Amino acid sequence: MYTFAPKLRLVAIIAMVLGLVLFGAGYFINSANGIDFVQEQMAQEPDAFNVSTTHAEQGTSHEEVSQNGAGAHVDAHAEHLLHKYHNRPWSAMLIAAFLFTGIAAAAMFFLAVQHASQAGWSIIVTRIMEAISVFIPYGGAILLLVLIGSAMHLNHIYHWMDLDLRDFESENFDKFLKTKEPWLNTPFWLIRSVLYIVLWAFAAWMLRKKSKYLDQNPSRESYWSLYKWSIIAIVIFALTSMASGWDWVMSIDPHWYSTLFGWYVMVSYLVTAIAIMTLIAIHLKKGGFLPVFNDNHLHDMTKYLFGFSLLWGYLWLCQFELIWYANIPEEAVYFQQRDFQYDWSYYNMLILNVVVPFLALISSSIKRNYTVVTVLAFVVILGHWWDIFNQMAPGTVGPWGAFGLLEFGAFFFVGGLFVFIVMNALTKLQLEPKGNPLYHESKVYEYPF
């Protein structure tokens, strides 16, 4: 059985405490600033805050602008920017919670794929996937708190929740949001959000339960029960992972659309999940808790890290090129905003997420180097935190997007909680699933090249 190392436990606790301190300090600074601060920033950097936003988002119509003059329009724009500024604590926590909850859900999916495909090589690392999936209800609870806060209008992350935008009689009426109302309405949106978390947590719990039962009662019936539930888990994840990407990320920019975006989001936290699985496997190996894990298993896990990094890059490029080629305003605005306000961030993240993994992991011998793979796994995790930031921040905080106290605080807190929950879950699991009929194949597995 695994013993949670006191040093690692202390690191997780320090990360949580440090995260809360940083986040609290950032929240205090953020809440203390008002409209005067925003107007001062607009005066100092007029180009940076001359963002292309709709009058509907600002709560200002074309008629109001013409009647009240430019001064009223500037005041409305300042108020809009103030809302964006005060979104920042909520946005930072949403980014961190979405990332780590998505990682846990992706680990559940990857676990189900191993059982459904009857893969032999990966059986000795399935307990790691099971432990990661334990975090789903914890991360999901944090995520739901942010989403419920949005539904209660405690923030302005999802501006489509403003009923005024869907009122035919309103000067701010938005016909595009009205057409999406059957899907984008607050009650149905919240119900779906809860359903995603519950289904993920339930599927992960069933897979852990069936796996444990197989260890205690190794039989053909027990194995096929695990197999059937793995198929169910894959179907659940296939449907909900796409829809959650639409609901939690894409609806931040409700006028924008992309038929590829759901896949892009899913692969982002899937590759991060592979990186974390690899780190935990290396940690267990070096601690002597998983002696049967060897270079061959590391090689295969690193292949997935390499392959999914390239898949993520392919999807990023496909989305970019198709939107650039079609040049449809409703699509191109997504990249225009990021090119104007986030040019320092949006393209540079490709270095961590594609260029570095490709160059560093293309060699088979490097895939077996524990030190290099460890470093690359951390690089990928940070890179995809950056990616989620780029997906959400332009729509949630606009020109206020940056990595500061709030962003690091939320990341350290949720990340520390993730480490604490996952490693504690490992202490309750038998690391080697010896009841699985494919365990021996995994134990003697040797990469053929």
Image (spheres, rainbow, N blue to C red):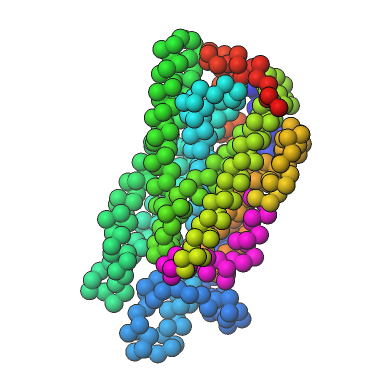
Q: Nearer the viewer, residue 436 or 55?
A: 436
Q: Residue at x 71, y 41 (%)?
A: 361
Q: Is residue 81 left or right of residue 183?
A: right
Q: Is residue 96 left or right of residue 53?
A: right
Q: Is residue 198 visible?
A: yes
Vertical relation: 6 (above or below) 152: above
Q: Residue at x 32, y 56 (%)?
A: 184
| Magenta stretch in the rendered image | 328-353
Q: Is residue 342 magenta?
A: yes
Q: Is residue 203 left or right of residue 92?
A: left
Q: Is residue 430 visible?
A: no
Considering the image in quadrants, where does the N terminus appear? top right
Considering the image in quadrants, where does the C terminus appear? top right
Q: Nearer the viewer, residue 176 or 33?
A: 176
Q: Position of residue 213 (x, y in %)?
A: 46, 15
Q: Position of residue 67 (x, y in %)?
A: 34, 89
